[in-house]
Amino acid sequence: MLWLSLSLFVSLANAKPLVARWDNMKLKHGWETLPAHWVPIGAAPEGATIDLHIKLKSADADALIGTLLEVSDPSHERYGKHLSKEEVAELVAPHSDTHAIVASWLAAHNIAARPAFNGDWLQLDAVPIETANALLDASYQLYEHPSTGETLLRTQSYSLPAALHGHVSVVAPTTFFGTPQAMRATSRVEENTKVVQEDVLRAQALSPDAVPSSCASTITPSCLKALYNTTGFTPAATNRNILAVAGYLQEFANQADLTTFANRFLTGASSATFGTVLINGGQNSQNNPGVEANLDIQYTTGMSFPTPQIYYSTGGSPPFISDDNTPTNTNEPYLNFLDTFIAQSPLPQTLTTSYGDDEQTVPLDFATEVCNLFAQLGTMGTSVMFSSGDFGVGGGDCQTNTSPRKVQFQPIFPATCPFVTSVGGTTSVNPEVAASLSSGGFSNYFAQPSYQTSSVATFLNAIGTQFNGLFNRTGRGFPDVAAQAEHFQVVIGGRVGSVAGTSCSSPTVAGVVSLLNDFRLSEGKSSLGFLNPLLYSTGLSGLNDITSGSNPGCGTAGFTARAGWDPVTGLGTLDFGKLKALLG
Ligand SMILES: *[C@@H]1O[C@H](CO)[C@@H](O)[C@H](O)[C@H]1NC(C)=O
Ligand SMILES: *[C@@H]1O[C@H](CO)[C@@H](O)[C@H](O)[C@H]1NC(C)=O
């Protein structure tokens, strides 16, 4: 009692005055021109509301990433000593002054807030649009994406009182026009390709020394097991190891299709199943199997059965109805997913996501904080994989969205986040070569992290001045690793189809990583958590370097895969047998 009242007295005496001007607004983020494709279609309807997320700056800005890099560095004494959710909350905690000043600003607008994520975010529920506009000097209105028909409520710019710029790093949804519908899934069905009617490969015990040439035209789990040297490994930590798939776009993973797939392609796995977690109105319609969702769950299962699988179905809001007062599409897919996922107990040790957007369409402040949430997952022991994208060095005309417009290679976010493992694509066998679709390059937002400086420098020296001015030589290079990306046999609605994209590669790598996590847990060790510091150092000898192929785009021939790291296939593909030996 005495201690409590004493400390209260001290903190009051030391507190800075909380009187600040709320009318001195300063721009936080605005687009020079509207993000491509979006068309304003009018004011928000009468009575519309929006749920806002506010990220409070952490008192110690470097604590999270510093800790992440220590617990992920195999040569550090803290390697593998992952943090609990509570410990991460302490690490990212805002200063009490930050809480106080933001609270008094919200109180001045009569807005209530509750903590979200690890306590470093606030959530404001159902804020009337007029209040949000006043709070943020914003102009929320409806925008439509003509090709998808999707509507959402966003603002072209927003501001904060000058006194808050040191305390708040982002407010969302504001200027990020990405939505579950518009985020690009990185899978596509291949036309007119040969489909294997049954697993001709299944009977053979494929060895990595003899990957059959048929795997160059049709990929099944047997091919991948042989290629990545997992054949013969039986998971043993299936009571605690979990592999998670993040799904968006109203994409549903289908149980009947998984069973058909398992019967056809996975000996002894006819009981294969998965859990489903629904987020933000996400659904699980079993009448409507999604190509992306089925691909992901069939190949994470294909690589790691009987490891438990969970499919996270993150919803968007239903299409906007103009005469309806219910909130329109006010959700932000990454935040809705992460808010739920970070709170999972137990937290899955491996996570794969096959979605992304051109980095330049994601506001820097928002991208930075979403990336930091992936860093939180790594700090807690989860390995996070993202497809690098299917657009080579860039899709479309590759114009920048700031004036003067010019052609620039277009990196893909979140693959460019330095705290995820970004997965590019390969094709063919004996040898594997880069798939031309494989997105890769250099971030314009995130600086090169220390774990990759030497590998990336070797590549940059090798190419000299090639493509100078088209990409950012100091940016984070991606992808980190690669896996097969074409001719995947997937069951969709009971029929086998052939699918391509780095959407194939990320679940494949996640499957191998999940087996490594299984092995580590079985040995009484920690899960692997954030992989990159390992992959770029001691893990290197457990990877197969891919040294030919390229990723054309933006009217250029693209980068060329070469010995060592390259922005097409990263460091190469995973050899489970060798990595397991390194990690034992
Ligand atoms: C290049 O990347 C750095 C981060 O390494 C960033 O600060 C800078 O703004 C980028 N330059 C351009 C032109 O995007
Ligand atoms: C597969 O892994 C084993 C270790 O389990 C290793 O000895 C072997 O060289 C690997 N095979 C290939 C082809 O990389």
Image: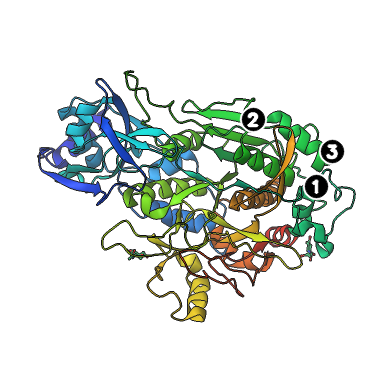
Give the quadrant of residue 62. bottom left
Residue at the spot of label 2: 275
- The amino acid type found where label 2 is placed reads Gly
- Residue 417 visible, this orientation: no
Q: Is mark 2 within 8 Å of ligand 2?
A: no
Residue 6: x and y, percent?
Answer: 21, 34
Q: Nearer the viewer, residue 492 or 146?
A: 146
Q: Residue at x 42, y 59 (%)?
A: 397
- The amino acid type found where label 3 is placed reads Gly
Mark 1–mark 2 Cα distance, whole angstroms, equals 28 Å
- Which secondary structure, mark 3? loop
Nearer the observer, disc 1 or disc 2?
1
Q: Which numbered dot is residue 196? A: 1
Q: Tell me if label 1 and label 3 are in contact, CB under 8 Å.
A: no
Residue 50: x and y, percent?
Answer: 31, 28
Residue at the spot of label 3: 268
- Residue 370 visible, this orientation: yes
Residue 107: x and y, percent?
Answer: 18, 28
Q: Residue at x 20, y 33 (%)?
A: 133
Question: Mark 1 or mark 2, which has the lower sequence index?
Answer: 1
Q: Nearer the viewer, residue 235 or 337?
A: 337
| Crowd class of label 1 (few under 14; some 14 to 19; many from 20; radius 10 Å) | some
Question: Mark 3 or mark 2, which has the lower sequence index?
Answer: 3
- Which secondary structure, mark 1? loop
Mark 1–mark 3 Cα distance, whole angstroms, equals 19 Å
Give the quadrant of residue 285. top right
Give the quadrant of residue 134. top left
Question: Mark 1 or mark 3, which has the lower sequence index?
Answer: 1
- The amino acid type found where label 1 is placed reads Val
| Crowd class of label 2 (few under 14; some 14 to 19; many from 20; radius 10 Å) | few
